[in-house]
Image (cartoon, helix red, strand yellow):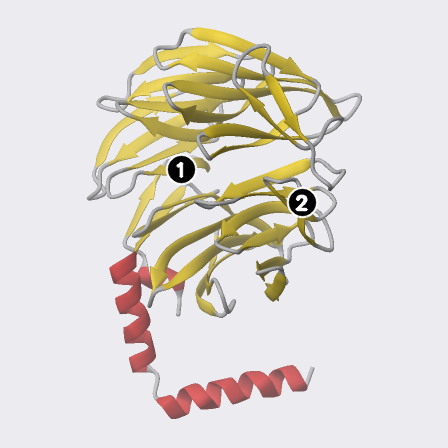
Amino acid sequence: MDLFSSVWMTRSLGEAVSALYLEPGAGLFAGGWNGCVKSWDADGNLQWTAKLSDRVTVLQREGDALFATAGLHVACIDVSNGSVRWDHALEGSADSITVFEDTLYAVSSVYDIEHNDFLESAVWNFSFDGKLRWIHRMDERPWVTLKHDGDVWFGLGRPKCGFANIRSEHEFVHNATKADSPITCGSTTETEMIFGHANGSVTNQKGGIVADEKCGIEDIVALEGGYVAALEDGCIVANKNGKKIWSAKGGLVTTLAVGFEIAKKATLWSGRWSGSEGTLSVQDCITGNILASASSSRCESISVDTRRTAIGCEDGSVHVWEKDMFSRRMKENKQTIPKNDRKSALQDKLRALRDR
């Protein structure tokens, strides 16, 4: 099925999309390369447009506030009208933000072009009204921030690697892993926290190695008893109970997320980039079977909830799929293709593969 034949809504940000935040059952926020931020309500109506100082990389809402990273800055936008309440410059690039309890955590890093490495990183703690509470500086770059089991954790690069709990300027509780390699990504379920490493290892919150992939892990999504990971060579692999259940080769994976269920089965949404063309695909999370796909602009960001999936692209487009509409289109697509024709099409594909 052509994926775009089932899209529920398409909107334009007016510049390359670099961040999305989809509220469960409510509206959608999008941020762009030049600092534009737009808000649409649940029906797709534009609510307001805001302007930040630089490229927006992360958006996260808490109450009546929308927090954002923009270049070197962390900003707070009023959800009701798009006005900027406060804006703080960090030391180096603002890499990520995480809302935890009554506070905002921000991660910054300083990159040295001459040494081709990060010189210093920091975790910043702000109150929701913009007051800086403390800063914890370190040599390690926190590549991922996760909330799990009533706490917040930071997956670290070299020299320490492992992951840490940082709850004040002087409180740094380090947890080593058996994979002596920088953590590059991470994900959680209700019961587990997993990390992907630069050497291809996957570890859990106990520090043990769950699996070893063939090369570095760029992105990972935790499942109950397993995970789906995007590797640096473009391969997507799925693992369940310690065993690989499927894999798919292709171009660079630019977006990866588990979305709504179809027929009680979770869907995997992924964007790829060949260097000149983008591809967006939806797969059965457990079997790897492709349910729908389409050529697209380069997919730069993704946000999901239990009923919708939003994709932001380099051409400025924002596409939203809704569970019920997607299911109906899939059903209609199957009904329009006679059974014999589907069998014939499969035979043609197998014959083409055989003749290569």
Q: Residue at x 68, y 42 (%)?
A: 197
The residue where tag 2 is placed is 208
The residue where tag 1 is placed is 20
Image quarter in which the N terminus is found: bottom left
- Secondary structure at badge 2 equals loop
Residue type at the position of mark 2:
Gly
Image quarter in which the C terminus is found: bottom right
Tell me if I can see residue 164 in this picture.
Answer: yes
Quarter-of-image position of residue 42: top left
Pinpoint residue 324: horizontal percent, then vertical percent.
Answer: 25, 61
Relative to 191, is 74 above or below?
Answer: above
Quarter-of-image position of residue 84: top left
* Viewer-closest of 322 and 39: 322
Q: Residue at x 60, y 58 (%)?
A: 236
Ranked by sequence position, the earlier of labels 1 and 2 is 1
Q: Residue at x 67, y 45 (%)?
A: 208
**Depth-wise, is mark 1 or mark 2 nearer the camera?**
2
Name the outermost residue toward the right: 115
Alpha carbon distance from label 1 to label 2: 33 Å
- Secondary structure at badge 1 equals strand
Left or right placement of residue 244 versus residue 88 in this view: right
Mark 2 nearby-residue class (10 Å; few <14, some 14–19, many ≥20) = some
Pinpoint residue 281: horizontal percent, then vertical percent.
Answer: 47, 60
